[in-house]
Image (spheres, coloured by chain):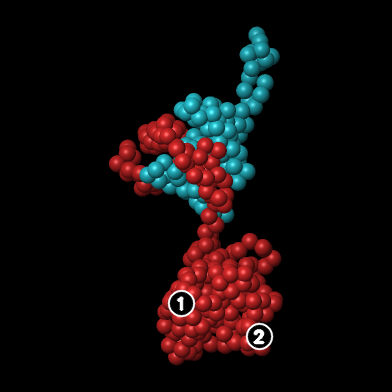
Chain colours: A red, B cyan
Amino acid sequence: MSDENNITNSWNDANDENGMTDAGANAGAGRPENASRRKFLKAALIGTAATAAVGAATVVGLEHAGAVPHLGITKLARYPFVGNTTSPGGSTGTACTSGTDPQNYVDQSTFNNKESIFLWALFTKLPAGSYTMFVSPTIENKGGAICSPSPASNPFEYQGSTSSSSNVQVYNLSASAVTWTCHPSKKTDLGTVTRNGASMAAAFSTPVTVAAGHDLQLQVHMHNGCSGARVVSVTISLFQSPSATPFLQASTSITINA
Amino acid sequence: MGFAFYPQARPDVETHVLPDGSCLLFDPITCEGLALSIVGALVWDYCDGALAWDDIVSEIAGLTPQEPGVREEVQWFLKEFTQNGLLRQAAEIETVSPGSPELQG
């Protein structure tokens, strides 16, 4: 439940004196629900400080290690919101994978090594503008520096060679033409391709111009080229020119069998 | 005469207090989540415009006198909140020292 300060207390909703759920302006320190929350936080701090922290380990690589380790090894950690996101204007982004039968794109998230994969991203209700996309981890050209410096770094390569224009395909679609949430059920649902290329860089060598309210559909043909089982999180970032900050991001998890 | 800064959290920043006393903030403008330790959660809770910066530091540090590092940590959080735009542009409140002309007859 949220109180007037747009704060949710997941610790014990019974402690909210009024149980109100509306978010709103900061109500100040005097209100009962603020007092009980502060009381709880004070007790948490005092109780934690009173506990002996023998052997409290420092964790390497955390963004900001606490000056007082046993009061919180991490003082503050930032998490940019990836995954399926919504922009303040109502645009959305989703990512997924499927099999590659053009007559029947079936959702699939687990693949065998070298098995053909379609990586999809759909960004909807976009403001008018010019857009580029970027995929992470980098998809290597076929025969390129895959699995380098380790199999866990860049495990994917494009299905076709560097001369294949069908590795990456981009579709600029009107909202009415899109009846799916991530990928169509078959190739003919997509219509005429707007932009294609042998790689993401080639396909987006110049931004794609989109009218207000339109959707952008990305389709990437790739496969895993590194031995060994792994789970890879792939993120597609959409940039609205000329901003260097992602306008939207969408992620999907791909499981590769050994 | 001096000025005191009264930190006040932006009302649009979502705050989710977790059972262990830590909390998660979500800034809808930057679409960024921030996980705060217990100290950070308490500092954030104190950012309601009621207390001046120094008073917040003193009050929280006073809860754990056996932990001298907490004072510095509170200062650090207040600076982080300020630098990351999580606080409102709180009006500076003019404070009047006892010997100032304003208090003379």
Looking at the picture, tell me which residue is in the foreground, A226 or A32.
Answer: A226
Q: Residues within 10 Å of mark 2 (few under 14, many from 20)?
A: some
Image quarter for residue B22? top left
Tag 2: residue type? Thr
Tag 1: residue type? Ala
Q: CA distance from mark 1 to mark 2?
A: 26 Å
Identify the residue position indicated by label 2 in the image. Answer: A162
The chain letter under disc 1 is A
Q: Is residue A258 visible?
A: yes
Identify the residue position indicated by label 1 in the image. Answer: A258
Q: Residues within 10 Å of mark 1 (few under 14, many from 20)?
A: few
From the viewer's perspective, tell me whether residue A101 is left or right of residue B79. left
The numbered mark at residue A98 is none
Looking at the picture, tell me which residue is in the foreground, A137 or A123.
Answer: A137
Q: Residue at x 58, y 70 (%)?
A: A150
From the viewer's perspective, tell me whether residue A47 is left or right of residue A178. left
1 or 2: mark nearer the eye? 1
Above or below, comparing residue B100 to residue A67 in the picture: above
